[in-house]
């Protein structure tokens, strides 16, 4: 049986990870989404409409680029898959357009989600505007204050940004509020998760929508070089951009796959978000995963300089790939991430998102240690959103 037929199983398990741990009420809705996805996503109409969107709206395929200057500086050969050039500036639109298209085929009027830093919210609001769907984005009050430009973008795109005012007023509370709102009107709305997370079938759907990255990248890399990369790397928050590129190379045993988690300020509790490297088996947000948890099984506080990576768990498929030994997971700390951010900007004219700079930093280490080898980095997003923050806090560096 091929990998993609085998995983996940019918219940949404990747080995012991994943599944669906939700209330019976929510389970009914997940079953409906699952059924709809299985029939609709295989129809010729759905596939060709999505393909058309990829080409004409998103601007795909995104290029694979050889970093000549950067490679000369380091020693090895570094290539980038340019998801920063995907419309709206990151890989996120790949799954948001898919989820919104599914909502349209299911006859829904509204899509909703939570957002932390606002990146998922902006991508989903874009998809909603494209399809003429209503859009509600739940966001903690604290995050709303911090992420003013993204809040304004969502509003401009026609989304309703709903402040969440209880608890710590950040992402966790926003998730609860979005689920609650969804359950009030599941007939007319679809909840859209922002990564390969949550109850089945979301990790599967989001992976499928992100596979376009790996399919394109493998072919492009081979066309350029006549071979496959020795290594492929991507940053892992929830793990969607990493699953997207890794799936293109899972069967290529000679290609090493490396997932990069945020090592933050230190490896002490609360200073990082490396759930695959340091987490233990638990259940959160409706699925089984390696998570950073306290004695009671609640998620621990997490931190990263890249707000898109500070999540206390990871996609269930990553947990399995770790246990199978097919993907190696490692960490990059804030300082290494910043160094990569400055170096790639200066040598190649490409400002990476701080999230993506974690993968770039790993590639720098790899290239120095392996001067004869090639490494392909999934550059998940552009860094324009991070420029003010970096310069205010760390100044201009070489
Ligand atoms: C959201 C985000 C990530 C993290 O999400 P994954 O699901 O782990 O891919 C990484 N990079 C960028 C640019 C993002 O916006």
Image (spheres, grey):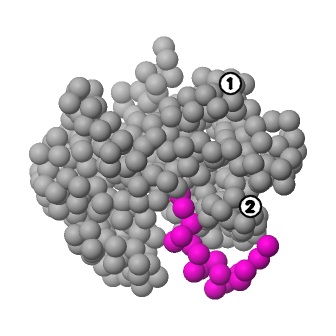
Residues packed near mark 2 inside 10 Å, few (<14), some (14 to 19) or many (20 plus)? some
Which quarter of the figure is the C terminus placed in?
bottom right
Q: State whether the magenta stretch is mostly helix, strand or loop.
A: helix
Above or below 389: residue 306:
above
Q: Residues within 10 Å of mark 1 (few under 14, many from 20)?
A: few
Total label count? 2
Q: Is residue 277 positioned above or below 391 on the image?
A: above
Q: Is residue 31 visible?
A: no
Quadrant of res 251: top right
The picture places residue 53, in percent across and down from the top left corner, at 30, 43
Residue picked out by circle 1: 226
Horizontal and vertical percent for residue 243? Answer: 53, 41
Tag 1 secondary structure: loop
User: In this picture, which residue range is highlighted in magenta?
Assistant: 381-398
Q: Is residue 377 left or right of residue 139?
A: right
Q: Is residue 299 above or below residue 191?
A: below
The residue shown at (63%, 60%) is 350
Q: Which of marks 2 and 1 precedes in the sequence? A: 1
Residue name at image x 74 percent, y 52 percent? 362
Residue 383 painted magenta: yes
Which residue is nearer to you in this view: 193 or 49?
49
Which residue is disc 2 drawn over?
Answer: 347
């Amino acid at each position: 049986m091929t990998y993609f037929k085998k995983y996940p199983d019918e219940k949404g398990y990747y080995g012991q990870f994943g599944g669906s741990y939700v209330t019976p009420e929510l389970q009914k809705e997940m079953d409906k989404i699952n059924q709809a996805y299985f029939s609709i996503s295989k129809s010729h109409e759905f596939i060709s409409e999505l393909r058309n969107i990829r080409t004409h709206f998103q601007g795909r395929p995104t290029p694979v680029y050889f970093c000549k200057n950067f490679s000369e500086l380091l020693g090895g050969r570094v290539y980038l898959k340019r998801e920063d050039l995907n419309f709206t500036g990151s890989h996120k639109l790949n799954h948001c357009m898919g989820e919104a298209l599914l909502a349209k085929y299911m006859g829904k009027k509204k899509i909703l989600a939570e957002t932390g830093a606002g990146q998922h919210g902006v991508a989903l609001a874009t998809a909603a505007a494209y399809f003429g769907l209503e859009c509600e984005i739940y966001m903690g009050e604290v995050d709303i204050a911090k992420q003013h430009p993204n809040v304004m973008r969502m509003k401009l795109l026609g989304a309703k940004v709903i402040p969440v005012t209880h608890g710590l007023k950040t992402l966790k509370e926003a998730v609860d509020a979005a689920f609650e709102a969804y359950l009030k009107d599941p007939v007319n709305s679809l909840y859209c998760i922002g990564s390969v997370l949550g109850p089945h079938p979301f990790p599967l759907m989001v992976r499928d929508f992100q596979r376009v990255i790996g399919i394109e990248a493998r072919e492009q890399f081979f066309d350029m070089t006549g071979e496959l990369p020795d290594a492929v790397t991507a940053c892992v928050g929830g793990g969607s951009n990493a699953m997207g590129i890794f799936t293109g190379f899972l069967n290529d045993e000679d290609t090493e796959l490396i997932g990069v988690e945020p090592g933050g300020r230190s490896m002490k509790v609360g200073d990082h978000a490396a759930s695959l490297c340091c987490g233990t088996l638990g259940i959160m947000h409706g699925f089984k995963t390696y998570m950073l948890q306290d004695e009671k099984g609640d998620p621990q506080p997490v931190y990263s300089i890249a707000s898109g990576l500070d999540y206390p768990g990871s996609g269930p498929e990553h947990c399995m790939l770790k246990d199978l030994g097919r993907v190696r997971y490692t960490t990059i700390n804030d300082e290494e991430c910043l160094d990569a951010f400055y170096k790639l900007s200066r040598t190649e004219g490409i400002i990476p998102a701080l999230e993506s700079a974690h993968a770039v930093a790993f590639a720098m280490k790899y290239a120095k240690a392996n001067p004869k080898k090639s490494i392909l980095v999934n550059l998940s997003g552009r860094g324009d959103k991070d420029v003010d923050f970096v310069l205010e806090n760390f100044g201009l560096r070489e």
